[in-house]
Image: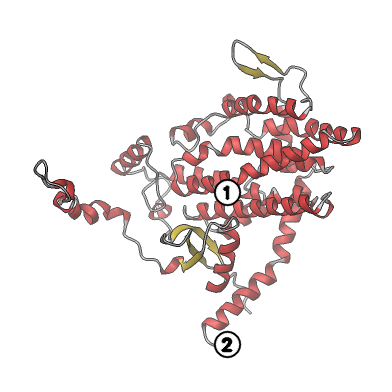
Amino acid sequence: MSDERREWPLWEVFVRSKRGLSHQHVGSLHAPDAEMAVRNARDVYTRRQEGVSIWVVATADITASSPDEKDAFFDPAADKAYRHPTFYHVPEGVRHL
Amino acid sequence: MYGLPDAEQRDEDRPEPPELLAEFDRLVAAETRIEPRDYMPDAYRKALIRQIAQHAHSEIIGMQPEGNWITRAPSLRRKAILMAKVQDEAGHGMYLYSAAETLGASREQLLELLHAGKQKYSSIFNYPTLSWADMGAIGWLVDGAAIMNQIPLTRCSYGPYARAMVRVCKEESFHQRQGFEILHTLSHGTQAQKAMAQDAADRWWWPALMMFGPPDDESPHTEQSMKWKIKRFSNDELRQKFVDATVPQAQALGLTLPDPDLRYDETAGHYTFGAIDWTEFWEVVKGNGPCNHERMEHRVRAHEEGRWVRDAAIAYAEKHRTGQGARG
């Protein structure tokens, strides 16, 4: 084995707090592999029954949008108010619409 | 997701770009959170790494004084509670290291800085735990002071730190209550038990007040931290809140606090208290407290002795990833 320092990789942890809800990001941790990451996540993030299901994803495998282009990237949705129901005028008295 | 932020590679002497700085200031002023990949001034990033790392180290070193009593807890109930509490401290350290890593610091690097004495942990953990009653006093006073410090941090301008603190604060209130309960039981027990509780309160009171840090006029980071909304209250403000909350609790315990100058000021609506011995505080910070050496020595040894386990685990993982290992 070489002397080179090998740190345990970083994993992002997602927890489903109860049935019916989606998994939510709760933080990260280090673990040698995915299986140990799930076990460590149980000990670090669900000591009080905060979850019924855990996902772990290697941090290096996540692709994110860039904050530098956030305006340009999300702008196309900004001027499309007609995508929301409140954009439309509903005549008085009309119901169930 | 959190990869090394661009700002980390910027030349230190280069001025902060004005338009990005203006956007950062606007977000902070608007009480929105700064998130890991947002632009932030180098000084903000460094101040946060310093503070979060110190906080994480405190949680990790903080396991030692209490771990000292796990095998000698007076009942199975107390033992289970104390183990859960020490496990929580480990968990809190993990949340905080995880938050520091979103700023581009690595876990290994932070631990190396701690072990080399280049980053600090809270001085309170350099005091010894001499009796079982110290488990009560630590929960009641030390965790009580920590909660007072931590609640405003749930509104800190940096998102991952604020979120870690929400989690920590939820868990801390059990810590404080279990400590109070230990002291309440002792102070309503035999004379010897009550004396033990009083002795613990006598020894932990002043160090607990020092946990809020030096007085405002000697606290170098406070002003900038408050501008950045990392810190919401000054050291002296939080210390006063703690005293006001804690003195009536001492009365409920039937214990006295070791300060002849402690009295209620009707007009101010606050308790006034005697002068804190800052010489003692700075001596402990400098490494001359009763347990500084022991705490660091234990921490470094635990890390070194665990190295083969970490190496074996990663070797196993690598072997299986490359398909050399037999799948069971």
Residue B319 pos. (x, y %): 57, 83
* Residue B109: quarter of image: bottom right
Question: Quick check: can you spot residue B67?
Answer: yes
Q: Is the residue B176 above or below the residue B261 in the image?
A: below
Give the camera-side residue of B63 and A53.
A53
In the rendered structure, which amino acid carries the disc numbered 1? Ala
Q: Say what secondary structure mark 2 lies in.
A: loop
Residue A16 pos. (x, y %): 47, 61
- Categorize mark 1 by other alpha carbons within 10 Å: few (<14), some (14-19), many (20+): many
Q: Chain of mark 2?
A: B
Residue B314 pos. (x, y %): 59, 74
Residue at 71% of width from left, 41% of height from top? B139
Q: Say what secondary structure mark 1 lies in.
A: helix
Asked whether, in this view, residue B73 is left or right of residue B312, the answer is: right
Asked whether, in this view, residue B69 is left or right of residue B174, the answer is: right
Are dots 2 and 1 on a single chain? Answer: yes
- Quarter of the figure that contains the C terminus of chain B: bottom right
Q: Chain of mark 1?
A: B
Which residue does the numbered mark 2 point to in the structure image? Answer: B327
Residue at 60% of width from left, 10% of height from top? B267
Residue B159 pos. (x, y %): 44, 47
Which residue does the numbered mark 1 point to in the structure image? Answer: B53
Residue at 18% of width from left, 55% of height from top? A76
- Categorize mark 2 by other alpha carbons within 10 Å: few (<14), some (14-19), many (20+): few
Give the camera-side residue of A66 and B240.
B240
Q: Are marks 2 and 1 in contact (CB under 8 Å)?
A: no
Question: Quick check: can you spot residue B288?
Answer: no
Q: CA distance from mark 2 to mark 1?
A: 39 Å
Q: Is the residue B209 above or below the residue A31 in the image?
A: above
Q: Is the residue A68 above or below the residue B138 in the image?
A: below
Asked whether, in this view, residue A72 is left or right of residue B156, the answer is: left
Residue at 47% of width from left, 40% of height from top? B156
